[in-house]
Image (cartoon, rainbow, N blue to C red):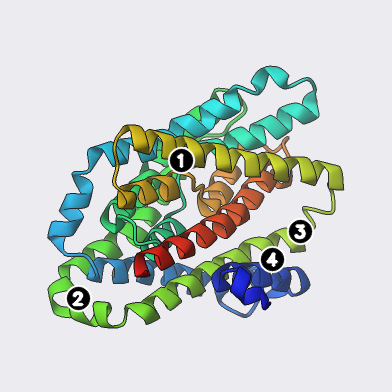
């Protein structure tokens, strides 16, 4: 039986792109002549522009008014994740354990990743307006909440004067394209609906570029070689367990709140995501120089890959279910 019949093609593509990043990491470096960073940034903005085209103002308003769904997603992102990690704080026994725990707290305190959250919800036929709203607002909330969580346990943090620039970038890259797309929906909405297959392909291509760049930088910096295989196995197992624990808990809360299937998909997909983009930027601001950034970012990089692999598989299965 062919691999493609067992594994979703997009999941397979993510694995392939990670392997490519391992053998050919140079293209992902900032010194490369290939403008990968520019393509990724423009691609993310276009993703949200196209989503704006597919949304009528009435649908977007309906998504914003779904306050129970928004509360669950933001609760999961900024409270449930950190509280789970806090529960393991008494188990920290030495300096290495302290650094590893800080790395997981940093992961837990980050906002949801924007582009892949919305793309996966779209693939799975979830509540797209609510996904765009939650994914967008999460990055803005994270600018305030993430430093607060980290500052509770790291007193050596620096002055966060760059947060205003991060806030501005989020508005320019995400909110502005969505607003422009919505404003042009009545003119180009039919075009977006007619070519939705090609737009979905574009979305996946941008995600693959982001994954490649993230892992290429890690492989080029030899982050993984500096750690023992046992350490990586422990961190990988912990990130997988963390993801499924939060995913199951959100599903449980969704049932209690009596969400329909579309809202449950959005809650679980957006509420379990963590942004590698925010993590890499925030780490340079919030983590003191005395702590190795490579070790701090390792759980985030693994979680980023795991969440894409697992959610993309689930999203495709749900999409096929809706098609049937």
Near-viewer residue (184 or 34): 184
Which element carries disc 1, helix, strand or loop? loop
Q: Which mark is drawn over residue 223?
A: none
> From what the image shows, is residue 281 above or below residue 47?
above
First-in-chain label (4 vs 3)? 4
Q: Secondary structure at mark 4?
A: helix
Q: Nearer the viewer, mark 1 or mark 3?
A: 3
Q: Can you say which quadrant of the picture contains the C terminus?
A: bottom left
Cα–Cα span, label 1 and label 2: 40 Å
Residue, disc 2: 189
Tell me the crowding category of disc 4: few under 14, some 14 to 19, or many 20 or more residues within 10 angstroms, Cα based: many
Q: Secondary structure at mark 2?
A: helix
| Residue on which disc 4 sits | 216
**How far apart, in angstroms, are the residues tagged by discs 4 and 2?**
37 Å
Instruction: Report, in whole angstroms, how far the alpha carbon at label 1 lies from the one at label 4.
Output: 29 Å
User: Where, by quadrant of the figure, is residue 215 drawn?
Assistant: bottom right
Q: CA distance from mark 1 to mark 3?
A: 27 Å
Q: Residue at x 47, y 52 (%)?
A: 113
User: Which numbered tag is attached to residue 161?
Assistant: 1
- Residue labelled with disc 3: 221
Query: Going 49% across and 48% down the picture, which residue do you hit?
Result: 273
Name the residue at 63% across, 36% down.
104
Q: Position of residue 232 (x, y in %)?
A: 78, 46
Please name which of the two marks, 4 or 3, marks the residue nearer to the observer: 4
Mark 2 and mark 1 in contact (Cβ < 8 Å)? no
Q: CA distance from mark 4 to mark 3?
A: 9 Å
């Amino acid at each position: 039986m062919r691999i493609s019949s067992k594994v979703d093609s997009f999941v397979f593509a993510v694995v392939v792109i990670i392997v490519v990043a391992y053998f050919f990491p140079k293209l992902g470096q900032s010194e490369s002549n290939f403008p990968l960073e520019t393509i990724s940034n423009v691609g993310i903005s276009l993703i949200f522009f196209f989503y704006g085209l597919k949304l009528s103002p009435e649908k977007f308003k309906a998504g914003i008014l779904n306050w129970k769904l928004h509360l669950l997603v933001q609760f999961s992102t900024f409270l449930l994740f950190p509280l789970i990690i806090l529960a393991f704080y008494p188990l920290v026994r030495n300096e290495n354990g302290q650094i590893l725990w800080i790395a997981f707290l940093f992961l837990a305190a980050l906002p949801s990743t924007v582009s892949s959250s919305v793309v996966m919800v779209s693939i799975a036929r979830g509540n797209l307006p609510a996904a765009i709203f939650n994914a967008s607002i999460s990055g803005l909330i994270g600018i305030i909440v993430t430093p607060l969580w980290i500052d509770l346990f790291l007193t050596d943090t620096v002055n966060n004067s760059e947060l205003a620039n991060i806030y501005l970038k989020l508005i320019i890259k995400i909110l502005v394209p969505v607003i422009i797309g919505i404003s042009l929906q009545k003119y180009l909405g039919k075009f977006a609906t007619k070519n939705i297959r090609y737009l979905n392909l574009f979305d996946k291509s941008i995600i693959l570029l982001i994954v490649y760049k993230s892992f290429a930088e890690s492989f080029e910096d030899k982050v993984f070689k500096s750690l023992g295989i046992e350490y990586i196995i422990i961190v990988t197992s912990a990130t997988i367990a963390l993801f499924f624990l939060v995913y199951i808990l959100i599903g449980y809360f969704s049932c209690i709140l009596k969400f329909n299937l579309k809202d449950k998909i959005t809650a679980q997909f957006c509420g379990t995501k963590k942004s590698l983009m925010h993590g890499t930027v925030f780490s340079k601001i919030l983590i003191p120089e005395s702590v190795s950034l490579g070790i701090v970012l390792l759980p985030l990089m693994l979680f980023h890959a795991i969440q894409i692999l697992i959610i993309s598989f689930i999203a495709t299965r749900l999409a096929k279910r809706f098609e049937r």
